[in-house]
Amino acid sequence: MKLYDLADYLGANEYPGRGILLGRSADGKSAVIAYFIMGRSANSRNRVFTATDDGIRTEAYDPSKMEDPSLIIYHPVRVCDGRTIVTNGDQTDTIRDAYAEGHCFCHALRTRTFEPDGPNYTPRISGIVFPDGAYKLSILKSLGGDPDCACRFFYEYEAPRPGVGHIIHTYEGDGSPLPSFEGEPRPVAITAASAAALTDILWRSLNDDNKVSLYVSFIDLATGNADVVITNKHGEDA
């Protein structure tokens, strides 16, 4: 299996949009999670990640400049009953609520579809990491930009290999309209030994003009304790 180098993979894409990385640390002791957001418009770029009791949420960096909160203000990460849910929209809450009602990841996402932002019809990407480190990823996208046809794809990784992860993102690159991610989540090498080290790799690799915020977590599989790093472009030099 070919493993992509994270720095090379992200560095070659000017605009992957929003992205989720799930996997296992090289020593096999930690589940690895990363989520990043990018933006082209002033409204999309006017955001930061802030910590919450159960994860993170997006907020306006300058509330006076917020134009439209729909699709850009949400909880990307929520931790519930040992499961960590990470998504690029309010489907985070859909998945959390489904588990509370005795349902599952796939059941929750079958009630949702891609974002109503034609002509892009941005995919909804979602992931979940279980206490044992197993994880799932999903993408809900239109069929070739057809707003009348939703395609739902689910990927399950029951026994993650040390040093291996999978990344999925909303766009294949920049364009007008933006081209949706294609194919399966890309297998990538996870060489970083800590959340801080992985943050450094990812933040340096994302396009400097378009990157907005980054969340990275290493979850100790023995204790469940999480080492979390949040990075925001706004205020990073403050």
Image (spheres, rainbow, N blue to C red):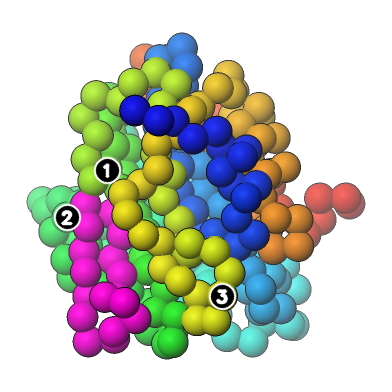
Q: Earlier in the sequence, mark 2 or mark 3?
A: 2
* Residue 79 belongs to the span the image colors magenta: no
Cβ atoms under marks 2 and 3 closer than 8 Å:
no
Under mark 3, the amino acid is Gly
Q: Position of residue 100 (x, y in %)?
A: 19, 52
Check disc 1 and report the residue beneath it. Answer: 136
Q: What secondary structure is marked by label 1?
A: strand
Quarter of the image holding residue 132? top left
Check disc 3 and report the residue beneath it. Answer: 175
Under mark 2, the amino acid is Cys
Q: What secondary structure is marked by label 2?
A: helix
In the image, the segment drawn in magenta is 138-154
Q: Is residue 211 left or right of residue 81?
A: right
Under mark 1, the amino acid is Lys
Does the image show residue 85?
A: no
Check disc 2 and report the residue beneath it. Answer: 106
Tag nearer the camera, 1 or 3: 3
Tell me the CA gap for discs 1 and 3.
28 Å
View extreme (top): residue: 27
Residue 220, relative to residue 75: is it above or below? above
Q: What secondary structure is marked by label 3?
A: loop
